[in-house]
Image (cartoon, rainbow, N blue to C red):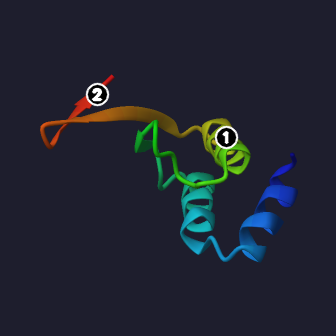
Amino acid sequence: MTKDELLTILKENNFDEIIELIEDAETGDLAELELVESLGLLYDEQLNEEVLRLLQELGVKIIYVTDVDGEEEED
């Protein structure tokens, strides 16, 4: 999926926060993103994978964390 196709889908579904993350990544304002792998960013697994792929292509480091007794740990 191209970046334009992805952005079109995100706009159609009103995923404004995800679009903002991508815009921040494009401008260099987002270097790292902490994420619980089992939750992801979006419920749609394929769309989630495409967004994460694009963010990584834009130079964002994805840091997967786990929640153990309310504390976050870096993998």
Q: Earlier in the sequence, mark 1 or mark 2?
A: 1
The answer to which image quadrant residue 15 occupies is bottom right
Q: Indicate the position of residue 70 as horizontal and vertical percent values.
A: 14, 43
Count of numbered marks: 2
* Residue at image location 63% in from the left, 66% down from the top: 19
What amino acid type should be assigned to the residue bearing mark 1?
A: Glu
User: Which one is in front, 53 or 40?
Assistant: 40
| Mark 1 secondary-structure assignment | helix
For the residues marked 1 and 2, what is the alpha-carbon distance in whole angstroms?
20 Å
As displayed, is residue 12 above or below residue 62?
A: below
Residue at 87% x, 48% y is 2
Which x, y percent locates residue 37? Answer: 46, 36
Residue type, mark 2 in image = Glu
For the residues labelled 1 and 2, say whether their Cβ atoms are less than 8 Å apart.
Answer: no
Instruction: Say which residue label 1 marks.
Output: 49
Q: Which residue is mark 2?
A: 74
Judged left or right of residue 68, residue 48 is right
The C terminus lies in which quarter of the figure? Answer: top left
- Label 1 neighbourhood size at 10 Å, few (<14), some (14-19), many (20+)? some
Residue 66: image location, x then y, percent:
30, 33
Residue 3: % across, % down: 81, 52
For this view, does 69 lie left or right of residue 48?
left
Seen in the image, is 69 located left or right of residue 64?
A: left
With respect to residue 69, does 21 lie above or below? below
